[in-house]
C-alpha cells in the first residue's frame, strides 16, 4: 500500500461537508501545473506556519490565476487558512465571470458521526469557540473586542451563502452571458459549452432586445437555485407529510420510540458487519431482533430481493428524519432529498407487504452496547463544552 495519508480522503463526506471551488482552466495550463509539481523534490515540506495544506492550495490556484488566492495576515496571524483561500478566490473570481466560477457541495452524510463545524479564521475562533472566548471574557475583554472588529471588518465570509449564489456550472455560464450582455460584448472566444448544459451562448443575435434575455437569465438562475435548494414552504410541506408517517412507523413497532429513530444509525453500526452482495455492491449483515438479515446500501440493492424491506424502510425513515431536522445549511440538496423521499415511499409499500406485528418486537433494536473508555467519554464531553 502506498505511503502517505491519502486514505483520509476515502469516505471524507462521513466526517464533514466539502465545498469544491471550480474555475475554468486550459489543457496547456494544466500541463504546466503538472510539470511544475513533478519538478519539485519528493520530500516532506510541511510547515504549520508557512507551508500547510492551505498554502499548497493557494500555490496551485495562483499558478493559474496569479494573486487570486491570498492569506489573511490579520485574521490568521500570518498563517494561511482554508477560509482565507476560499474568500480571496471567491472575491477574485466573482469579478471575472469568464472564469466560470462555481461551487459544488458534498454534504456530510447522515449518521452517527458528529456534525462538522464550519471552517473559521483564527480571529473568528477567538470569539466563537468557548475555549478561547471564556478566558478573554474573564481576563481581557479589550482583546476580544479587537478580534471581533478585525473579523467583521476584514475577514467576514460565509461559504454556504457563496455556494447558494454560485451553485452550478449553469449559473456560471449564465453569469458570463449576463456580463457580456451588460457590457455589449459579443466575443465568444471562451467556449463554455462543456460547462453549460442549457446549451445556449449569447452571440448578439439571439434576442432583438438584450433586456429580454437579461430578464430570462435572472429567471433561469433562480430556477436553478430552486431546483437545488427548494423553498422554506416546500421543506415545511415535506415535514408535515413526514411527521404522521414516522408516528405510524413507531406505532407499528418499526421503532420503539423517537429516541430509537435518532440513534438508529449508531444502532445499525453496532448490530451489523459490512460486506458485498453477489454483484459486488455494498450491503450489511444485520443482527435484527435475534435474526440475521441483509440490508442493501445502494439505491439498486436496497430494493433487491435479499434486502430486508423493514430494515431498508427504517434506514430511509432515519435518513429523511435527519435531513428534515437539520439546519438548512446542513441539508443535502433538495433534488437529492426528493430522490430519497421517493425511495422511502417505495420501501414503505414493500415493508407493508411483509409487516410483522408489534407484539413480536417488545425490545429495542440495539442489543450490543457500545464500548467506550473513560478517555473517549471525556474527550467527547470536552469537545462539546469547548467548541
Image (cartoon, rainbow, N blue to C red):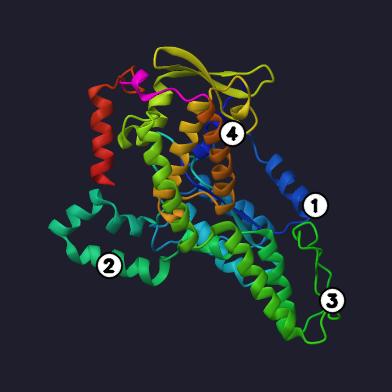
Give the labeled residue for mark 2.
146
Query: Is the residue marked by circle 2 packed among few (<14), some (14-19), or many (20+) residues within 10 Å?
Result: few
* Separation (CA) of disc 4 from disc 1: 27 Å
Q: Which residues are magenta?
A: 354-363
**Of callouts 3 and 4, which one flags the residue occurring earlier in the amino acid sequence?**
4
Residue at 34% x, 32% y: name it: 260
- Mark 1 vs mark 3: which is more N-terminal? 1
How far is the residue under mark 3 from the one under mark 4?
50 Å
Q: Residues within 10 Å of mark 3 (few under 14, many from 20)?
A: some
Q: CA distance from mark 1 to mark 3?
A: 25 Å
Q: Is residue 170 above or below residue 179?
A: above
Cα separation between marks 2 and 3: 51 Å
Q: How many marks?
A: 4
Q: Which residue is mark 1?
A: 27
Q: CA distance from mark 2 to mark 4?
A: 40 Å
Q: Does 333 sit left or right of 236 as displayed?
A: right
Left or right side of 343 for 205: right
Element under label 1?
Answer: helix
Amino acid at each position: 500500500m502506498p505511503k502517505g495519508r491519502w486514505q483520509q480522503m476515502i469516505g471524507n463526506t462521513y466526517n464533514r461537508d466539502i465545498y469544491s471551488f471550480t474555475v475554468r482552466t486550459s489543457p496547456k495550463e494544466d500541463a504546466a501545473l503538472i510539470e511544475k509539481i513533478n519538478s519539485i523534490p519528493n520530500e516532506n515540506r510541511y510547515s504549520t506556519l508557512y507551508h500547510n495544506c492551505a498554502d499548497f492550495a493557494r500555490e496551485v490556484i495562483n499558478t493559474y490565476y496569479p494573486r487570486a488566492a491570498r492569506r489573511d495576515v490579520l485574521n490568521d496571524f500570518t498563517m494561511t487558512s482554508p477560509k482565507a483561500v476560499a474568500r480571496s478566490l471567491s472575491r477574485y473570481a466573482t469579478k471575472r465571470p469568464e472564469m466560470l466560477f462555481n461551487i459544488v457541495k458534498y454534504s456530510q452524510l447522515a449518521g452517527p458521526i458528529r456534525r462538522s463545524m464550519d471552517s473559521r479564521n483564527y480571529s473568528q475562533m477567538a470569539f466563537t469557540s468557548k475555549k478561547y472566548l471564556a478566558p478573554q471574557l474573564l481576563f481581557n475583554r479589550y482583546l476580544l473586542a479587537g478580534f471581533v472588529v478585525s473579523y467583521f471588518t476584514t475577514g467576514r465570509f460565509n461559504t454556504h451563502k457563496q455556494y447558494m449564489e454560485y451553485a452550478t456550472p449553469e449559473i456560471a455560464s449564465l453569469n458570463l452571458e449576463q456580463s457580456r450582455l451588460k457590457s455589449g460584448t459579443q466575443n465568444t472566444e471562451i467556449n463554455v459549452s462543456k460547462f453549460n448544459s442549457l446549451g445556449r451562448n449569447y452571440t448578439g443575435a439571439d434576442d432583438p432586445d438584450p433586456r429580454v434575455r437579461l430578464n430570462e437569465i435572472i429567471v433561469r438562475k433562480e430556477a436553478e437555485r430552486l431546483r437545488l435548494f427548494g423553498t422554506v414552504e416546500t421543506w415545511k410541506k415535506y415535514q408535515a407529510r413526514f411527521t404522521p408517517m414516522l408516528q405510524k412507523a413507531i406505532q407499528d413497532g418499526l421503532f420503539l420510540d423517537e429516541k430509537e429513530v435518532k440513534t438508529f444509525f449508531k444502532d445499525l453500526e453496532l448490530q451489523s458487519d459490512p460486506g458485498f452482495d453477489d454483484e459486488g455492491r455494498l450491503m450489511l449483515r444485520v443482527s435484527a431482533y435475534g435474526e440475521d438479515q441483509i440490508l442493501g446500501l445502494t439505491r439498486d440493492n436496497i430494493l433487491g430481493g435479499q434486502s430486508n424491506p423493514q430494515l431498508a424502510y427504517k434506514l430511509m425513515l432515519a435518513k429523511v428524519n435527519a435531513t428534515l431536522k437539520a439546519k438548512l445549511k446542513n441539508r443535502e440538496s433538495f433534488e437529492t432529498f426528493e430522490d430519497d423521499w421517493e425511495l422511502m415511499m417505495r420501501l414503505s409499500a414493500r415493508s407493508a407487504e411483509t409487516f410483522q406485528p408489534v407484539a413480536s418486537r417488545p425490545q429495542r433494536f440495539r442489543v450490543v452496547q457500545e464500548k467506550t473508555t473513560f478517555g473517549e467519554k471525556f474527550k467527547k464531553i470536552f469537545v462539546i463544552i469547548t467548541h
